[in-house]
Image: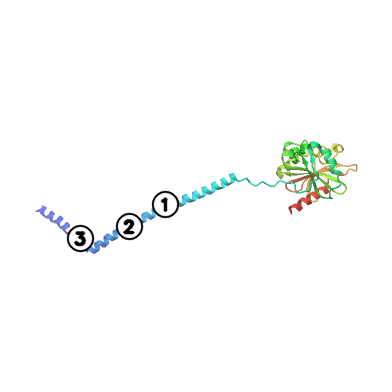
Amino acid sequence: MENENQKKIVHTYADDLAKAMDTTDAKVVQELLEQGREKELLAKEEVTKKKQKVWYKLGAIVFVVGAILSLAYSIYHYKSLTVPPEKPVSVGVFPSTKAFVSNETDIRKVIESITSDSSFEKDRPYLVPIVKNADEPTLLGVKESFDFFESKASEPFIASFNIVRLGIINIGERNVPFVIASTKDAESSTKEFLIAENSLLQNIYKALGIDISVYDPEIGKSFVGEFLYNIPVRSLKYKNKEGIDQTIFFYARATQDIVVMTTSPQALKAIYNNLIGQIN
C-alpha cells in the first residue's frame, strides 16, 4: 500500500512538471530561449572585446617601444656616420709679405728683412709666410714654426696651439715684429703660458727681434698683469736707468682663441682693432 502511495507521489511530481511545461505558452518558451542565446552572445562578445583590448594595448606598447628603439638606433647610426663640424682655425685675415723659405734663411735674417722694409702701410698688420722649401710652398706647422724661431719651448706649450704665425706692423717710427697664434683651448693654453713664463723670453726673443743680452738680469723673472687699451696682458718688465718700469715684451689674448706676443702696445691695439673689425 505504501509503495503504491510513493509511486503516486513521484508520478504526481513528474506529471506536475509535465503539466507545467505543457501549460507554458510555447511563445514564452521561445522568447526565453532567444533571451538566453542573446545573453550568451553578449557574454561572448564582451570576452572577445576584452581580449581585443588587451591585444591592442600590447600592440601599442610594442609599437611605441619599437619606435623608440628605431629612433635611438637612427640617432646613434647618424652620429657614427656624421663627422662633427670642426671649429674654424684661423689667426684672422691679414695681408702677407713676401714668402721666406725656411731652408734658405733663418729667423735673424727674416727679422732683419721685415723690420727694414719701408713698404708696409702704417698700423696695418701683415703676416710673414714662412714655407718649408721652394719646391713645397707649404706654411710651417706649429712645431716647425717654433723650431724656425730657434725656440726650446716645452712640448705641452707647443701642443696648445693650432696655428703660429710671424707678423710685422708699421707703428710709424719703426716696424714691430709680433707672433700671433690660435690656441686649441683658452683655459689650458692660459695655464701653459703661466707655466712657460720663466723661460718665455728665451724662447721667443728671436722672433720678436729682442736683443736678449740687454735683459739678461730679467730672465726668469715673473710677469705682471695689467691692462693695455682695456685688454688684459701679461708683461715682462725691467727698470731703466731712472728706475722706471719699462716693458720688454708681453702677451695678450686679443680674442678668446687668439694670442698675440709683441713688444709694442700700439701694435697690439692695431691687431686687436683689425680682428674686431673682422668679427663685426
At 34% from the left edge and 56% from the top edge, which residue is drawn? 43
Label 2 vs 1, first from the N-terminus:
2
Q: Position of residue 72 (x, y in %)?
A: 54, 47
Residue placed under numbered mark 1 in the picture? 55
> Residue 240 sits in which quadrant?
top right
- Which of label 1 and label 3 is nearer to you? 1
Give amino acid for label 2: Leu
Q: Residue furthest front?
A: 135
Question: What number of labels is visible?
Answer: 3
Residue placed under numbered mark 3 in the picture? 21
Residue placed under numbered mark 2 in the picture? 41
Pointer 3: residues within 10 angstroms few (<14), some, or many (20+)? few
Q: Can see residue 75? A: yes
Q: Secondary structure at mark 1?
A: helix
In 3D space, how far apart are the residues under numbered discs 2 and 1 (Cα atoms)?
21 Å
Label 2 vs 3, first from the N-terminus:
3
At 56% from the left edge and 45% from the top edge, which residue is drawn? 77
Q: Position of residue 165 (x, y in %)?
A: 77, 43
At 76% from the left edge and 45% from the top edge, which residue is drawn? 259
